[in-house]
Image: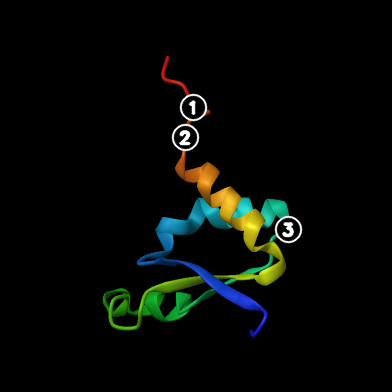
Amino acid sequence: MEHFKTIAIFQYPAEYAVLQLLFDQEGIRYVFQNETMISVFPFYSNAIGGIRLQVHIDDISQAEQIMKDFNNPSNLKIV
C-alpha cells in the first residue's frame, strides 16, 4: 500500500458509489480503506476517520480530474 495515497475521505459508502463506477471505467487503481468496517458499524465512521479513498500514485492526476468533473456539473443543462 506504499504506492497509494489518500485523496478523499467519505462518511458513508453511498457518497462514492458513482465515483467508484467512473474509476472502474477509466481503469484507475484505487482502494477504499475502512469500507467494510463502516458498512457493518455505520456510526463508527467519525471514530475511525471515515472511508479513505486511496489511489495509486501514477493515477492521482487522472482521479482528481474525474472528481473535479464529477463535482462540477457544468455539462448538464436544465431544460
**Residue lying furthest top in this view?**
79
Q: Residue at x 28, y 82 (%)?
A: 47
**Residue ID for mark 2:** 73
Mark 3 → mark 1, Cα distance in angstroms: 24 Å
Residue 23 point in image, percent of width and height: 63, 56
**Residue ID for mark 1:** 76
Q: Are marks 2 and 1 in contact (CB under 8 Å)?
A: yes
| Crowd band around label 2 with a 10 angstrom C-alpha radius: few (<14), some (14–19), many (20+) | few
Q: Amino acid at mark 2?
A: Pro
Q: Amino acid at mark 3?
A: Gly
Q: Residue at x 42, y 14 (%)?
A: 79
Residue 14 point in image, percent of width and height: 41, 58
Q: Nearer the viewer, residue 55 or 79?
A: 55
Helix, strand or loop status at disc 1: loop
| Crowd band around label 1 with a 10 angstrom C-alpha radius: few (<14), some (14–19), many (20+) | few
| Crowd band around label 3 with a 10 angstrom C-alpha radius: few (<14), some (14–19), many (20+) | few
**Residue ID for mark 3:** 27
Residue 12 point in image, percent of width and height: 37, 65
